[in-house]
Image (cartoon, grey):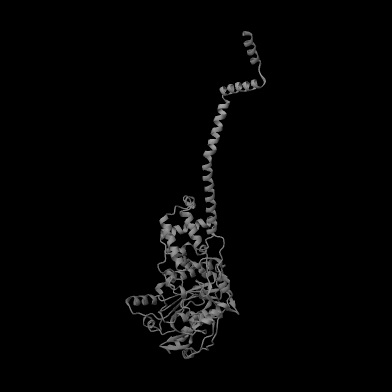
Amino acid sequence: MPNEKFREAILKSYTSNLPSIYLGAGICNNEIIAGAKVNLPMRMMNRHGLVTGATGSGKTRTLQLLAEQLSAAGVPVFMPDMKGDLSGMAKEGSVNDKINERVQALGITYTPTAFPVEIYSLSGKLGAQMRATVTEFGPTLLTKILELNDTQSGVLNILFKYADDKNLPIVDFNDLKKVLNYLTEGPGAAEIKSDYGKISSATASTILRKIVALEQQGVDQIFGETSFDIEDLFQKVDGKGVISLLNVADIQSQPAIFSTFMLALLAEIYQRLPEAGDLDKPKLIFFLDEAHLLFKDAPKAFLDQIDQVVRLIRSKGVGIFFCTQLTQDVPPSVLAQLGNRVHHVIRAFTPNDVKALKETIKTFPKSEFYDMEQQFTQLGTGQAFITVLNEKGVPTETVVTHLAPPASFMGPLSDSEYKNQLNQSDLYKKYKDAVDPQSAFEILSERMQKEEEEEAEEKASKAEAPKRTSRKQEKSTLEEVMSSPVAKQVGRELMRGVFGMLFGTTTTRRSSRKRSSIF
C-alpha cells in the first residue's frame, strides 16, 4: 500500500534515539498518517533553520510550537514578538473544536501548558528595557541603522578606533556626538590628522543629522547603561528553559533597529560563549522573525558579519532559525547553512511568485510521494513541507506535515495579565532605570574645558608680557646711563659738592684765603 510505504519511509528518516521535538505527522494522498511521526533531533538544531510561508499560513504558531518544546526540554529560547501576540505562552492554552480535531488526527494527547516567559522591549514601555552601549553595538551595525554610505562608514570607524585607543567609552549617542565634534571642530581635529586621517565637516554634519533623526524617533534609548547581560537569556525555571520575548509592537515602523539589535545580541553571544562542540541539545535557540528586514539594503560589511556569525556560532551550542515569507529573502551564503526547513504555503499569483516557488523547490530533496510544485500551493493552514538534518547530519525525506498545536495560549495576554507579568519580573526591575556613567562625553568635556582654561591663561600671559618688558627696558636704560663713564664722573662731582657743602673742603678754604689776601 502506498501509504504504508510512505509511513515506513518517514519513520526511517525521522526516528532518532536522541532527544527530539515532535512537529507533527506526515500527509500522503491527502490523508494524515498519524504513525508517520515527524521529529527534529535537538542535536541538529544548532545547524540552524528556516521557517517560511505566506501571511496567515501559520508561521507564528510554528515558532510557538518549536519554542514550547525546546523550553520543555530545558533549552532557553529568544524570539521577537512582532505583533505582541506571543505573550500568551505564559499561560495555558484553551481547548476548542479545532484543537480537538487536530490532536485526534495526529493521535496525540493535548495537555494545556504554561511556560516561563520573560518579556523585553527596546523602548522600555512593553517589557524589561534592552540596552546596549554604542561601543558594544560597533561601527558595522551602527552603519546599518544610520544608513551611512561607505565614506560616512569610514568616518564612523575612525571615531571608534580613536575612542578605543584613547580609552573613551562610547555609551550613548551623547558620547558619540561629543567624539564626532571633538575630532571635527574641536582640539582633536589636528591630533588625528596624521594617525587617523582628516574628517570633513560635510561628512561629520551628515552623520550628526542622522543621529539626531534617530533621537527624534526615540531610538536613542536603546543605547546606554545598564547594558543587557546575555547571561539572562540562559535562565531556567523548574527545569524549563525560559522563553525570552522581545516585544517590538511599538517600534514596527523602525524594522532596521530591532533586526540589527538582535544581530548585535547574537554577535555578543558568539564572542562571550566558550566553545561547546556537538551537544545532545543546544544551549540556546535564537529565532529571527521577519528576517528579510535584516538583509534589506544591507551593506556588504553587514552581510559579511551575519554570514560569519551564522557559520561560527553553532560551535558555541547556539542555533539560529530565520523566519520570513520567502526563501529568497535570505542571501544564498546564509541559506546554504540552514539545515532544517519548515516551509508553509507559497501563493503563486504572479510570475515572480511562480519563479520563487520553482527556486524554493530546488532547495528540497526530491520526493517520490509528491508533485511538489502543485503541493506547495495547496498546503492548508498549519501544514508545511519539512526536511531536517537527522542525527548523522543527512537531510531527511521531504514530507508534507500536519503540525501539532501549541500547548500554551495562542494569543496575547490581557492588559492586566501583561502588567502582572512585568511586575513579577526581577529583570524588568533590573533594567528599568538607566545609569549615566562617566564616559566619552564627560571625559572630553573636562579635557576641552581644561584646554580652554590653559589657552586663556596663555593669552593673559602674552598680554602681560609687553608691560613687564617696558618696565625692564626703562630700568635697563637707567642702569646703562648710570653705569656710563660720564654719569660716573658727574655722580662723583655731585657727591663731592654735596659733601663739601655739609663739611667744607680744603679746596674751598684755600679759595677763601686767596680772595682775602687780594683785598
Point out the image quarter for the N terminus.
Answer: bottom left
Query: Residue 42: x, y in percent?
Result: 53, 77
Front-most of residues 245 and 352: 245
The correct choice, above or below, for 485 with respect to 88 in the image is above
Front residue of 63 and 341: 63
Whether 120 is drawn above or below 515: the answer is below
Tell which residue pokes out farthest to the front in this image: 519
Q: Closer to the camera, 117 or 324?
A: 117
Taking the image as drawn, is residue 306 in sight?
yes
Could you say where residue 99 lies in the image, as x and y percent from the top left? Answer: 48, 88
Please indicate whether residue 479 sits to the left or right of residue 208 in the image.
Answer: right
Residue 230, position as x, y percentages in the image:
55, 70
Asked which quadrant contains residue 111, the reply is bottom right
Q: Is residue 515 above or below residue 360?
A: above
Between 389 and 174, the one nearer to me in the picture? 174
Residue furthest right in the image = 503
Residue at 45% across / 88% down in the picture?
32
- In the rendered view, does 285 fall on the left or right side of 325? right
Q: Position of residue 175 (x, y in %)?
A: 51, 60
**Residue 240 is drawn in which quadrant?**
bottom right
State the image quarter where residue 446 is shown. Answer: bottom right
The C terminus, quarter of image: top right
Residue at the top extreme of this rendering: 518
Can residue 15 be seen at all in this image of the molecule?
Answer: no
On screen, residue 483 above or below 231: above
